[in-house]
Image (cartoon, helix red, strand yellow):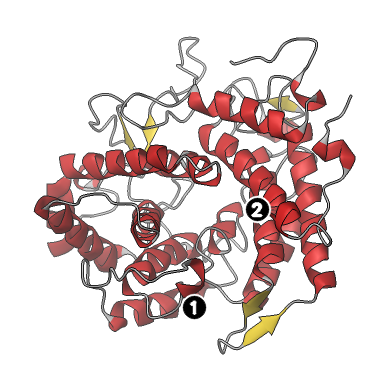
Amino acid sequence: MITPPTENPFHSLPLDERIKISYLNLERMRRPNGGYVASPYNAEDNAGDAYNVYWIRDIMYATYANEYLGCYDKMVESFRLVLEIFKKHHMKFVQASIIKPHLLHQRGLFMPARVHPTTLETITDEWGHHQMDVFGLFMYKLGDLVKKGFGFRFTTEDYYLMGNIRNYIFNMGFEEDFGVWEEGPEEHSSSFGAVLGGLTMWFDQGHYDYKYRGKIPISHLVPVSERMIAEGYGALTRLLPQESPNRPYDLAQLSLIWPYNIVDFETKKTLLAQIEKNLVGAHGVTRYPGDIYCGKGLHPGQDGPAQWPLGLAWLAICYGKLAEAGGEFDLSRKRVHFSWEERQHFFAKALEYFSRLEKNMTPDGAVPEMYVGGQPGHNTPLAWAQSFHIVAAQVLLNLAHKHPAHFKIPANIRLGQP
């Protein structure tokens, strides 16, 4: 762990210094090839599975912090690595696009969600690898980076691979998978929304135009049909506001608000209300009702379900993005404009969750994976949670800098707590 000087513990430092410490903790998990291990925990104590390996989703979310700090070269390097990982398993995309493997009996035929950080080979096929949100996130953010002008110098092989990823996610993207939390199989609105966001980014006929000052067309590079988009919206609408037929709400549904922004304002309000009312706790956000996953030495049966600080960061980002937008769209795609009072309310909510997040960070600025019974788990820090802390902080700082008359960061957050 990277530790600030004892006379200046993390929580007493100004916000810009806390961001630096948080980023140093994140960088500790970055490897020379541009990937991020999920956590430094190596399981040498035999208390759980090693987390110092690559989860493909975690790499992409972990590197998001680089964008908000202006380190685009590192973000591009991370996504280039993910592309290289997919290349090693290219034939799985080709085969599964033609004949769907059986979710339970042919797990080795799916693209793995977890790989070795050096060899990039599959670590195990014993659990639910088929997680469609991984591919939705990849297509969404890769397209976003290209539209922002960051060159990847794609080869013919790259385009062929991306075309097969498109076929793979359309062939299976709106059916049962194991979801963000590797459980199922079941239909998941968070997976459907991720896939729809990824397809829409490459199809884009205006949906994401608000994100870009200039227009760099990419739809001809990996063509996406209107039928794909229509089927995606139909599948997502059918499930919402539930996460799945057996899960009324889930932390993973925050992804429908950020990064994908793929649902209308009323749905966003419903999702936020459900999560805030039912899943938010003192130390974080429970992933879903009845969650029993926990870490080393923690007992959810007696101490309640695990609470993830990641969720506090995610809520802060979502509310920050609502304050930033100045408006939304309703179901009919009509513009909903926010008053400054409404935007200030969203900003205040973002500050509230950001403050609660930092209270649950360690004295050396690490974000634990979870708390159970007030005790942090052994996956501390958790790479994508560390990244989300940085993103949340930068969203708040950007708003306060752009609109100083309307958005003010309180002194206890801006200057730190003694």
SS of the residue under disc 1: helix
Residue 232's image quarter? Answer: bottom left
Between 143 and 50, the one nearer to me in the picture: 143
Residue 228's image quarter? Answer: bottom left
- Whether residue 293 is visible, yes or no, is no
* Residue topped by disc 1: 238
Q: Residue drawn at (11%, 51%), measured in percent from left and top? A: 157
Q: How many marks?
A: 2
Give how far across and how far down residue 298 sits, in percent.
65, 25
Give how far across and how far down residue 200 sits, in percent.
38, 71
Q: Residue drawn at (46%, 77%), measured in percent from left and top? A: 207
Task: Name the kind of residue labelled 2 in the image.
Answer: Ile
Is 200 displayed left or right of 172 in the figure? right
Residue 80's label in the rendered image is none
- Whether residue 269 is visible, yes or no, is yes
Give how far across and how far down residue 94 sits, in percent.
13, 56
* Residue topped by disc 2: 317
Between 64 and 211, the one nearer to me in the picture: 211
Is tag 1's residue or tag 2's residue first in the polypeptide sequence?
1
Q: Is residue 166 above or below residue 38?
A: below
Is 59 displayed left or right of 336 in the figure? left
What whole-number distance in Å separates the C-alpha atoms at marks 1 and 2?
26 Å
